[in-house]
Amino acid sequence: MSPADELTLTTVAPANGGSCIARHEGRVVFVRYALPGETVRARLVGDRGSYWNAEVVEVLDAADGRIDPLCPIAGPDGAGCCDLAFAEPSAVRRIKGAVVANQLARVGNYHWRDESEATAEPVGDQGATGWRTRVRLAASADGRAGFHRYHSAELVHRLDCAQLPAGMLDGVAEAEWPAESEIHVVLDDDGRRHIAVAGAKGEKGEKGGNRTSAAGGGNRTSAAGGGNRTSAAGGGNRTRVVEGDYETTQRVGARSWRVPATAFWQAHRDAPALYSALVAEWARLEPGMSAWDLYGGAGVFAAALAEGVGEHGSVLTVDTSRGASRAARAALADLGNVSVVTDSVRRALAGQRRRADVAVLDPPRAGAGREVIDLLAAAEVPRIIHIGCEAASFARDVGLYRDRGYQVEHVAVYDSFPLTHHVECLAVLQRPPGST
């Protein structure tokens, strides 16, 4: 077989990453844009030796959960934004639950649920569309904004992705942006839009076209035009604010954060409040206890933990991002029981002399990994809440905890990224007294 060859395949089960598994003459084929139990005509797009990758060209026998795509720009010849937009949202949640159950069993050696019974829970009441409040676009060499195609440098310049609320990208397609820059657009909790441009190759990046600025105003012809505010960004790059402010207002409960437009904040508008409430409930803190908030970002979980330990307890929140740490210090300035540390989790844990009663971890997609989990086990932290946004990494970490004597008390899976294969997983782990 060679790229562009077509096969007729029948899919069996969902795979981690958004594909479905099929087989051709004994070889595994990962088929994108298919549902389990479908017969499809698929084009081969990659040969990895032991397996092939393919994309659906035609659905010959559709599964019950297939619908007309909810996102008009996603698909085999479109953007990579909404790779499961062709499936009924409830079917997507079942797929995500099955994938997490499979990964926990295969990678983590832990039986959560039978794959046929597992499902992800919805987040909030928004539904599958219009839930995203932060998006990062790319600019082409000629200054046009777009979404990347799946695993490609090519851009799709149509911007009406179904994840985005109506009006969030008004004017962005018409504006001219610095060549090959990143365009960060945020709709914050005050309902204000903020647009910041980072990573521009040139200072201005103007191409002399007729497109108008997304920020409005009659005096500028380019979103990169002079007079816009600039801020220092990580890695020595400059961030240019073309609409709104560099810092955006985000709220969880009664507390507000000022978070850079280019920094991490949960994309789903209802996710921060949900996760914060779960952490507060599952931590089971009492006044005077100590808690660690690792990979803590702007300190959302630290705020919840601080309330649980009370004024005589202590909370340590750790993140490598200076911007996130600044946001945490500002938002939590009234909490004398919270310490904010800008460092790697590994170094911060290695320097700790006081054991925590609870540790909350929300690592990046790669997970926490062996070294960090070894440090937590060596510190004999009795209770851990672990959050993961990639099923295989999450399952691996759960297995590492179990190998070190922790028992899984609870697992929850949330559809925090509707229309996509991405998922949020949470585990509560308890270390029995006297375990080594």
Image (cartoon, rainbow, N blue to C red):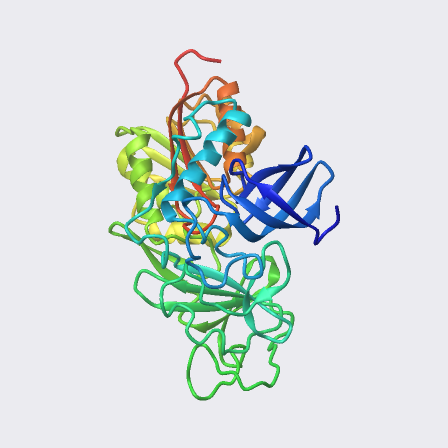
Name the residue rendered at 62%, 68% in the picture. 180
Find residue 81 and report its horizontal and vertical position in percent.
50, 57
Front residue of this view, candidates 3 and 170: 3
* 137 relative to 60, above or below: below
How many numbered markers are drawn? 0
Find residue 191 and report its horizontal and vertical position in percent.
31, 65
Name the residue rendered at 42%, 30% in the picture. 116
Please indicate, yes or no, whether residue 348 appears anywhere in the rendered image: no
Name the residue rendered at 38%, 41% in the picture. 414
Name the residue rendered at 31%, 44% in the picture. 274
Find residue 360 and report its horizontal and vertical position in percent.
41, 34
Extreme residue in the front direction: 60
Front residue of this view, candidates 79 and 180: 79
Extreme residue in the bottom direction: 219
Left or right of 344, for residue 189: left
Find residue 355 and report its horizontal and vertical position in percent.
42, 25
* 189 relative to 311, above or below: below
Picture quadrant where residue 292 is located: top left
Please indicate, yes or no, whether residue 176 appears anywhere in the rendered image: yes
* 105 relative to 342, above or below: above
